[in-house]
Amino acid sequence: MAQREGHGPGQDQRDASADEGRPDHRTMTAEQGRFCVARCSCGWRGPARRARSLARTDAEGHLQGG
C-alpha cells in the first residue's frame, strides 16, 4: 500500500523544536495500512505500531534522546 504524505486524517504533525531546543528534529506520525509509524526530520523512524499512542510515545522518546 502506498505511503501517504502531508497532513490529513491519520497524521499528527508535532513540532517540538521550540519546546525541546532541537530545531533539527520535527516528529510526525503516519499511517501505513493498519500500522502507525513515527518519523523525524533527521531521518529517524520508529517501529510500526498498531496504536497511534505508542507511535507518539516513540516520537517523544526520540526527542528526549532515547
Image: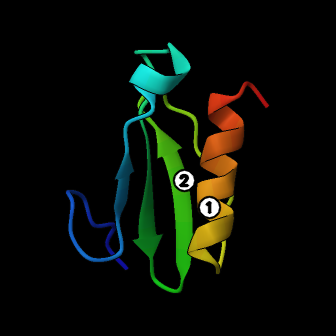
Q: Which labelled disc corresponds to residue 55?
A: 1
How crowded is the residue under tag 2: few (<14 C-alpha within 10 Å), some, or many (20+)? Answer: many
Residue at the right extreme, as displayed: 66
x and y, in percent, of residue 5 in the image? 24, 58
Q: How is the image coloured?
A: rainbow
Residue drawn at 49 percent across, 31 percent down: 43
Name the kind of residue labelled 1 in the image: Ala
Residue 46 is marked as none
Residue 2's x, y, as percent?
Answer: 31, 73
Q: Residue at x 37, y 36 (%)?
A: 15
Question: From the viewer's perspective, is residue 8 above or below residue 16?
Answer: below
| Tag of residue 38 | 2
Q: Secondary structure at mark 1?
A: helix
Q: Specify the quadrant of the image occupied by residue 55.
A: bottom right
Give percent across and percent down for residue 64. Answer: 70, 28
Where on the picture, by quarter, is residue 10?
bottom left
Q: Quadrant of residue 7?
A: bottom left
Identified by mark 2, the residue type is Ala
Q: Are marks 2 and 1 in contact (CB under 8 Å)?
A: yes
Query: Could you say where residue 50 lies in the image, as x and y percent from the top left?
Result: 64, 80
Which of the pair 26/31 is nearer the observer? 26
- Side of 33 relative to 48 (left or right): left
Circle 1 Cα neighbour tier, 10 Å, few/some/many (<14 / 14–19 / ≥20):
many
Instruction: Look at the picture and state if 25 lies above or below 10.
Output: above
Give me the C-alpha separation between circle 2 and circle 1: 5 Å
